[in-house]
């Protein structure tokens, strides 16, 4: 049987897709096991107790827990105006101060083709606190060519008045 792919193309596909498939399987299994723990921790993060406020929107706050988890708490785009306040806010874990988060995907934005499907992008994200300000650092690496992108820093929030940067 004749293959449409050369051996080098097949090797490239294996090298590019195998880590992604393994990552998806392991991430799914970990996510299922941690949902109850995540729910319990999420209950500790609240809008009222959040230590950081987004300077661009006083409706968005960041809560830092003792284990280093960072939650963003803000208005839900899906809530009705007359909903109870608890239903109008979203609480989402965005990262941890003590770890680097790595995610991967491809560069296919407008349909799939071989060139973009094998160009896997790995994004590294870290969060840091300096002078009572919360920062997000991010860099992308393209597996095709092994190029690293420029590291970007974004100021997310500042300590709220009367709160310290200590986790609660």
Image (cartoon, helix red, strand yellow):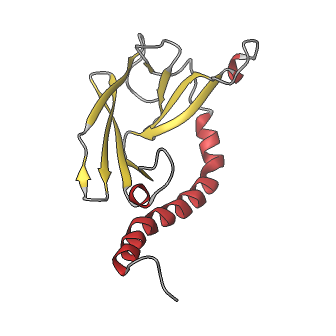
Which of 77/45 is in front?
77
Q: Seen in the image, is 159 located left or right of residue 93?
A: left
Q: Quadrant of residue 38?
A: top right
Counting labels gives 0
Q: Residue at x 38, y 58 (%)?
A: 115
Q: Seen in the image, is 84 located left or right of residue 60?
A: right
Q: Seen in the image, is 49 located left or right of residue 33?
A: left
Residue 159: x and y, percent? 38, 18
Residue 12: x and y, percent? 36, 71
Q: Residue at x 56, y 29 (%)?
A: 45
Can residue 63 be seen from the camera position used here? yes
Q: Seen from this angle, which residue lies furthest bottom?
A: 1
Q: Residue at x 42, y 72 (%)?
A: 14
Residue 42: x and y, percent? 59, 35
Can residue 100 be seen from the camera position used here? no
Q: Seen in the image, is 2 located left or right of residue 151?
A: right
Q: Where 10 falls versus 80 (above or below)?
A: below
Which of 107/87 is in front?
107
Q: Where 121 falls versus 62 (above or below)?
A: below
Residue 55: x and y, percent? 40, 13
Q: Where 35 falls versus 24 (above or below)?
A: above
């Amino acid at each position: 049987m004749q293959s449409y792919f050369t051996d080098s193309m097949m090797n490239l596909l294996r090298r590019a897709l195998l880590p992604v498939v393994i990552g998806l399987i392991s991430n799914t299994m970990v996510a299922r096991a941690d949902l109850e723990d995540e729910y319990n921790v999420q209950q500790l993060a609240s809008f009222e107790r959040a230590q950081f406020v987004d300077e661009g929107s006083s409706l968005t706050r960041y809560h830092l827990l003792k284990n280093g988890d960072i939650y963003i708490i803000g208005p839900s785009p899906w809530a009705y105006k007359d909903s109870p306040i608890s239903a109008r806010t979203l609480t989402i874990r965005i990262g941890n101060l003590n770890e680097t988060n790595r995610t991967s995907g491809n560069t296919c934005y407008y349909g799939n083709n071989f060139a973009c499907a094998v160009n896997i992008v790995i994004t590294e994200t870290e969060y840091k606190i300096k002078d009572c300000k919360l920062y997000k650092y991010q860099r992308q690496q393209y597996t095709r060519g092994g190029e690293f992108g420029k590291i970007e820093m974004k100021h997310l929030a500042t300590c709220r008045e009367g709160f310290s940067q200590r986790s609660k």
